Image (cartoon, grey):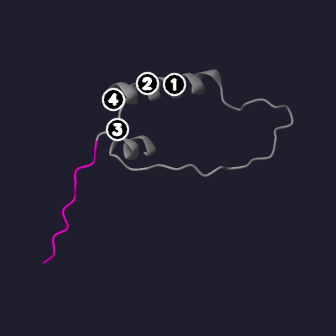
Amino acid sequence: MAYQAWINGFRLGEVPIHFRNRRRAASKLTFEEIYMALVNFAALRFRYGFRPRPRPAVLDEQP
């Protein structure tokens, strides 16, 4: 959803989330999950392009 908002010209920000450190310092993600995330990211970039589209100007109409 954030990528779609960025493509449509919205500004994005990040809010940090702090977690306690893991005892073994290992990720719970599997190799397959990481691979699929990268494939999906590449597919989004290919489908929607690499630069955000400019948002159309909104005219203020007063009734």
Instruction: Identify the residue under disc 3.
Output: 52
Which mark, residue 61? none
Asked if the residues shown at circle 1 and circle 2 are in contact, with their CB atoms under 8 angstroms apart, the answer is yes
| Picture disc at residue 49 | 4
Left or right, 42 with respect to 52, comes to right
Calculate the distance from the C-alpha at mark 1 to the C-alpha at mark 4. 16 Å
Residue span colored magenta: 54-63
How packed mark 3 is, by other alpha carbons closer than 10 Å (few <14, some 14-19, many 20 or more), is: some
Q: Which mark is residue 42?
A: 2
- Disc 3 + disc 1, Cβ < 8 Å: no
**Contact between labelled residues 4 and 2, with CB atoms less than 8 Å apart:** no
- Residue at disc 3, secondary structure: loop
From the viewer's perspective, is 27 left or right of 33?
Answer: right
Disc 2 marks a residue whose amino acid type is Ala
Residue 12, compared with residue 62, is above or below; it is above
Q: Could you tell me how far apart the alpha carbons at marks 1 and 2 are, in whole angstroms?
A: 6 Å
Give me the C-alpha separation between circle 2 and circle 3.
Answer: 16 Å
Residue 49 locus on image (x, y percent): 33, 29
Q: Are marks 3 and 4 in contact (CB under 8 Å)?
A: no
Among all residues in the image, which is located at the extreme bottom?
63
Q: Residues within 10 Å of mark 2 (few under 14, many from 20)?
A: few
Residue shown at 80%/46% (left/top)? 20
Q: Quadrant of residue 46?
A: top left
Distance of label 3 from label 1 (alpha carbons): 20 Å
Residue at the spot 52% in from the left edge and 28% down from the top edge: 37
Name the mark nearer the viewer: 3 or 4.
Answer: 3
**Above or below, 33 relative to 13:** above
Amino acid type, label 1: Leu
Please tell me in which quadrant of the rendered image residue 59 appears.
Answer: bottom left
Q: Earlier in the sequence, mark 2 or mark 3?
A: 2
Q: Nearer the viewer, mark 1 or mark 4?
A: 4
